[in-house]
Image (cartoon, coloured by chain):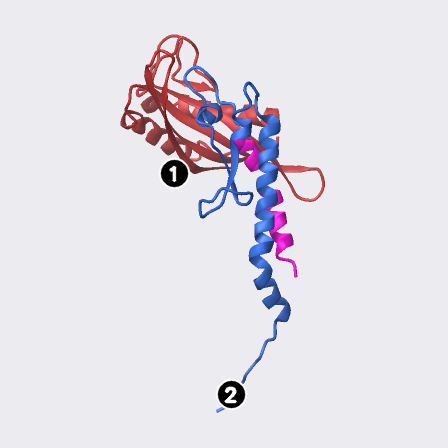
Chain colours: A red, B blue
Amino acid sequence: MADVLTRIDQRLYEILHGDATLLALLGTDATHTGVYVDEITPPALYPAVILTNMSAIDVTALGPQRNAVNSVWLVKAVGQGRSYKALQGIMDRVDALLQTTTSNSVYGSVVWTIVSEQSIQYAEYDPAGEPFRHLGRRYRILAPPQ
Amino acid sequence: MISLTATLTTPSLDALIKELPERLQSACTETGQTIQKEFEATSVRRTGSLAESVALVTSDGKINDSGARSVRAAHGPFVEFGTTRMAARPRFTPAVESQRAPFEQRVAKALEP
């Protein structure tokens, strides 16, 4: 299972980080790639896109053989300030890249299907009172077991 | 003109339909309780307030022991989805996802005559 999840997050990272249009919307420099798995490399540079695995369940039929892995991923944009609107363009691009039906760049041997299931937005204030906004989606990804 | 009439007697089906709400309620309750147990078992405990904040809420908004689960602690979303200083540590999503297939099995069993 762990290998499957690693392959999926690498594939998602490649798709997102490989898009110049998305990177132009993010905070990037020599040490900040703009797209991260689980957490941003400190000191953080915003806005940033973070992808996190939230769940993974083996799909079996009869017997113990795994036929697929049914996983849920959180992909969100995080930015300083109080504006969700500033993050909307980033998530629109993320969604276009992950949900595209016009190319096969996403789908293949690592990922079978990606379906957006839920939008998420929330506000955060760090201990210094600095406001941040999180805007994202939960995606269900069906992947081959190995 | 020829007229055909067919009469279908379904006493078992009528009984099933009558019992359906109670049977489905039982499937929902069992699923909700299992989600709560899994969430509590896997939650990182500091004060225990998050693990203890899970409540069963029915579709009509009443809080009781049947229906959907929800996390009511204010910091629940931050733990589940992460912050700028902390990676997401999802516990509610895995607990719910683990009960998808069992819930379908419970509903199928509830529909058995």
Q: Is A136 left, or right, of A10 in this rendering?
A: left
Label 1 is placed on what type of residue? Thr
Give me the disc on residue A102. 1
Extreme residue toward the right, this view: A63
Q: Is residue B4 above or below residue A88?
A: below
Q: Residue at x 61, y 33 (%)?
A: B37
Q: Position of residue A11 (x, y in %)?
A: 49, 26
Give me the disc on residue A20. none
Q: Chain of mark 1?
A: A
Q: Position of residue A91 (x, y in %)?
A: 35, 29
Q: Chain of mark 2?
A: B
Q: Residues within 10 Å of mark 1 (few under 14, many from 20)?
A: few
The residue to which callout 2 is attached is: B3
**Displayed quadrant of residue A28:** top left
Q: Is A14 left, or right, of A143 in this rendering?
A: left
Q: Nearer the viewer, mark 1 or mark 2?
A: 2
Taking the magenta stretch, the answer to whether it contains residue B98 is yes
The residue segment tinted magenta is B91-113
Q: Position of residue A120 (x, y in %)?
A: 39, 32
Q: Is residue A110 visible?
A: no
Q: Residue at x 55, y 37 (%)?
A: B96
